Amino acid sequence: MKNWIDLLYVIDFISVGILLSAVVLNTLKRLESCIKAYIFNSWLLSILVFFVAIKTGNLHLYIAAFLTLATKGILIPMFLSKIVRQMKVTRTVEPYLSNSLSLTISGILVTIVYTSLREGILVTGFSVHVLKISIAVALIGLFIMITRRKAITQVLGLLFMENGLFLAGFSLTFGMPIIIELGILFDMLMGVIILGVFIVQIRRNFSSVDLDSLTTLKG
Amino acid sequence: MENLQFIIIIIFSPLIQGIIRKFKAGLQGRVGAGILQPYYDIIRLLKKEMVLSTVTSWIFKITPYIVFISTIVAAMMVPVITTKITTKSSFSIMGDVIALIYIFALGKCFMALAALDAGTAFGGEGSSREMIVSILVEPMIMLCIFTTAIAAGSTNLARIAEQGYIFTPSHVLALFAFMVAVVADTGRIPVDNPDTHLELTMIHEGMLLEYSGKYLALMEWSHYMKQMLLFTLAVDMFFPVGIAHNIEPSSLIVSSGVYSLKILFMAGMMAIIESTRAKMRFFQLPSLLGGSFVLAVLSLLTFIMIGK
């Protein structure tokens, strides 16, 4: 089993898939497909943790894989799609930048990460490449947070960033102790729920989720 | 002997076109023409009388020959069933994949010139569209090729094909980008509709509109050959399993069997893509092609950083 993982470069494939699903987010035009990209990203993340767990045989990694799947792969996407359905948010994403421009910029971000980490830093984790990819994913998430108009896509950017940071921490340290992992995941869940409530309130007060309307002063 | 394998491409390329059409007809619930129909078309066109516009110059008359011959020269550089060709043959000085892409570009350039030469509106439209598409497609193809070339340590196609078993993240990314490039370059559906002469949509057909008879046969045939060559290129770069490394009859037979299976697979893929996708508006094309260009860049980056 362990040899099999090495032979097929499973970990490399999964990490490239994680990067790809973050890059693809720039081109998607519908909110549902953005959420699907997030589901895909989170499932790949938990599969990656699962494979590393098989390779190292740590029990707490198995638990981390399961928790990631349960919260990021199932609960949060369910909640987000419920918001999209119930709040009748218009389903198209309206970025400030055009699709091809934001795609190019995220390509440039990946290049910057790759070139600046070319020498590599001392890694005690399982893979240097995964660290680079995770930082690239976090940067793309940040970029999406900056350039999107709607509250819900900004939340998605935040979630992608969190996935990237989780992967970075994981690749450097083989995962944090389980209690910290639990705390972070619980925080995430609460954060997303609170942001969801915010989105609902914004929609109720301004009859749109476009955050641009918050910048005009009233009175 | 091994230098004659380009004849396979010349002979069988209309058959591949017929097979793709048959697959498409099957997927769309039609009976469709027989798989030999492109041969009949070519033979029929070769017998027909030619009509030449009086305003055309020598460029119009020389273009079919240049396109046909440049495609054959390109076919000579590609290992089809054995990789021995470009390493030992007299074409080894030019048997390089970058030269191959630019020999394609030569044919494309003359085709665009000839379309302008006849002076019709559709010809100009077709050639300007074709040039825009190829501006976007060519760097993409080059990047995909660079990924595989760095992996093989050579830009010689035979060396790339000698790699054997290749399955790495960067190759998978490059394969996706290359498939988009093949679809765009062979004028298939998300980019161009090969079955229509509707003036709003046509790209490749627009350039051939003024040709008739023997010249049209040559142009169509070289288009089929280019399509099969691109499939062969994809097969050589991404699934080189089973290709013969020598010219012993036994390994050649195995290799031809494997090769025909791989090409049939590519033809089936094309038919599925064409039947499940809708034709894109022309001005949406840059976003599709730009997306796969980023994919190609990522594949190169992934290769450089991950090292496989």
Image (cartoon, coloured by chain):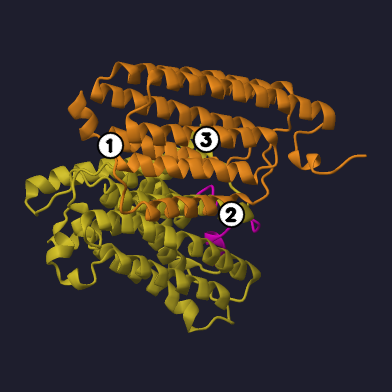
Chain colours: A orange, B yellow
Find disc 1 in the rendering and name its residue.
A124
- In magenta, the rendered stretch is B188-208
Which residue lies at the image location 58% right of the left edge and 40% below the top edge?
A: A28
Q: Comparing marks 2 and 3, which lies closer to the viewer?
A: 3
Location of the N terminus of chain A (image quadrant): top left
Residue closest to the eye, A181 or B164: A181
Q: Is residue A125 magenta?
A: no
Q: Comparing marks 1 and 3, which lies closer to the viewer?
A: 1
Q: In the picture provided, is B212 more to the left or to the right than A130?
A: right
Q: In the picture provided, is A88 more to the left or to the right than A167?
A: right
Q: Comparing marks 1 and 2, which lies closer to the viewer?
A: 1
Image mark 3: chain: A
Count of numbered tags: 3
Residue B57 position, x and y percent, is 52, 83
Residue B23 occupies quadrant: top left
Residue closest to the eye, B302 or A217: A217
Q: Which mark is residue A75?
A: none
Find disc 2 in the rendering and name its residue.
A101
Q: Please tell me how crowded label 1 is: few (under 14), some (14-19), or many (20+) other residues with Cα within 10 Å.
A: few
Query: In the rendered structure, which disc, 2 or 3, sits on the residue that comes first in sequence?
Result: 2
Image mark 2: chain: A
Which residue lies at the image location 51% right of the left edge and 27% below the top edge?
A: A39
Find disc 3 in the rendering and name its residue.
A160
Q: Is residue B204 magenta?
A: yes
Q: Is residue A137 above or below residue A105?
A: above
